[in-house]
Image (cartoon, coloured by chain):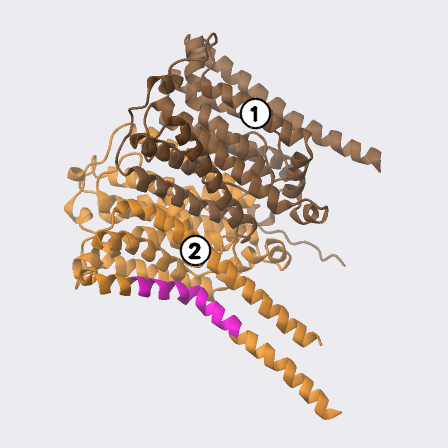
Amino acid sequence: MTSTVTERTGSAAAPGAGSRRLTERVFRIRESGIIVVFLVFVGVTTAIHPEFLNQQNIQFLLVNTVVYALLALGETMVVISRNVDLSIGSVLGLSAYVSAGLFGPHPGIPIPVVFLVGLGIGLACGMANGLMVALGRVPSLVVTLATLYIIRGIDILIVGGNEVTAQTLPNSFASIPRAGLLGVPYLAIAVAVVVGIGAYYLRSFRSGRELYAIGSNPEAARLAGIPTGRRIFTAFTVSGGIAGVAGVLWAAQYQTIDSTAGTGYELTVISAVVVGGVAIFGGSGSAVGAAVGALLLSSITSALNVLGISQLWLEAISGFLLLVAITLDRVISLRLQAALRRRSAGVGT
Amino acid sequence: MERDLTARLSATARASLRWETGLLLLVVAILIFGASTSSQFLTSGNFFNTGVTSGEIAIMALPMTLIIISGEIDLSVASILGMSSALLGYLWARHWPMLAIFVMVALLGLVAGLVNGLLVTRVGLPSLAVTIGTLALYRGVALILLGPNTISNFPASYTNIGVLPLPGTQIPYNVAIFVVLAVIFGIVLHFTATGRSIYAMGASPEAALFAGIRVKRVKTMLYMTSGLVCALAGVLWTFRLATAVQNNGLGLELDVVAIVLLGGVSIFGGKGTLAGVVLAVIAFAALQNALLLTNFNQEATGIVIGALLLVSVFAPNAAALWRTGLPRWARGRPRRTAPTT
């Protein structure tokens, strides 16, 4: 009698432990799968063309990734909470023109002030989005689609056919993306640190975890006492602020800014975030994954260059990659569900 | 029970009527604004120009309406337009007969829609993510087909649709096609069982499934219809501008979605009418044209369109917000509430 009981508990524990291992493996895959893909991609490209990993190319790659990786961090916070921010491209454009445009009338303006102006513009736009989504209780897709138009329209009215040209920008500003230590741009290091802080916040802070809870089940999160409105407001504000700063960096990098700066970035960034393993309907994913997603997308650009494949293939490849990424994610989560169901069935008997 | 149902139905009818009445007033206001600011506004030549520049967006808004009512979204519409335009140019440059090209373009549109539909319904992926992916993929195919080339040696008998109206009228070809399609889509959506099933699956996919509606099949058909209609829009766009180039129609997907939402269709599915979307199309076109004639920076008309979009989503919520009051965190000082036991 006793032996059968122990046997039954034993047999119930075994599949439980097995699927827990599977769960752990899958959660590791969510973050490390994309890193593996990235490493394999870099490895294969380097094997075919060793010059892919020369210093100049790496530097080029990192500088190109910086803006996307930053934007991906903000977008990750928003997407994890089961929302979406489509306005980041427009915020970037407005911030880039207004902040870099300060150098024309005020040539001696300190660079930190320019960054603060960009940050302020971004925060204001993000707060407007956040207020409307959290307070107005309207879907973020519609709100940020509207602000995408409105902010771009304001940008166009301000620009009015002019453009900021490279001559008006001081050397110290224009050289920000190029300055570096041993070939690694300071900017890339700074962005890596920021992404690291963001990832740590989302993983380990209570308010960060609450974003995941809101994304998994908004209603349950609200009933559990999470201030969902305030968290979503914060996520949009951060996303806007990041887009504002990214706009200043964009200006430093491209140096010619008209009213089209950053057009269409929103979809590229969402691609990077989703490729990086963040579920489009919220609740799972990491900031590091999203940053690697951005890195992967821009290293594909770079690899096409090195391999002599026409840039024309880039768009199709990145679209295809996004489809593969979300399909894989779906297959993995179905497997996980099946495993969990088996476990609960095992416990139930 | 039955009376309850009819009462509720008439309530919905009244609510949607209010929405369409509001849109109608908006259209009238825009027409008055346009007529009062420019003597050009109410001329037949201007009517032709307004129609011809908005025709393709209007056409693409029709299948988008059905897709959003069914609870999904299709962001790849403008890329399908671009890809169809590129294939048209690619094959024309290789001296294919025009009829064969039309068949190929139509097939391409159907396949593009089928890919969207299968990924959404059979693989079970969120349509927002799928169609962001195919937005890039289909635009990428257009890039691969044409590269930096521009193909513009189409015969004048085709490219005339951009400058000449239907014989004997002032109606541009693409507007005529829009009207015919709008009637067809309106009948399908509002007067057939398929149309009712689209509302049902948008309101509750599970309930629709248990009611015996073939949700996956209908949604796949909707995406294929959207692909075909966008391919048609691609052909019209190409001939109207007499150029096939890879970035034809770039970014139009957001205009199309904005129009459909402005037309009173709920982004969550299950609600909306085709009449509302047609009114929104008219408002969109008239507004852009009126702003153009008043020398407002035409690129910046997005401000007005975005503001209208915000109003359209806030209007239904404002009443609810008024009833329930602001959420606690937005009222400033937190208020202590007595425990309820």
**Residue lying at 36% horizontally and 66% vertically, measured from the top left:** A36
The one of A304 and A98 positioned closer to us in this rendering: A304
**Residue lying at 51% horizontally and 29% vertically, measured from the top left:** B308
CA gap, disc 2 and disc 1: 36 Å
Residue A333, position as x, y percentages in the image: 53, 62
> Label 2: which residue?
A324
In the displayed structure, would residue B104 be above or below residue B220?
A: above
Q: Is residue A24 magenta?
A: yes
Q: Quadrant of residue B150?
A: top left
Name the secondary structure under disc 2. Answer: helix
Rendered image: mark on residue A271: none
Tell me if I can see residue A119 in this picture: no
Tell me if I can see residue A227 in this picture: yes
**Residue lying at 39% horizontally and 49% vertically, measured from the top left:** A319
> Label 1: which residue?
B182
| Figure colour of chain B | brown
For badge 1, the amino acid type reads Ala
In the displayed structure, would residue A342 be above or below residue A140?
A: below
Q: Chain of mark 2?
A: A
Residue A228, position as x, y percentages in the image: 56, 53
Q: Which chain is orange?
A: A
In the displayed structure, would residue A160 be above or below residue A129?
A: above
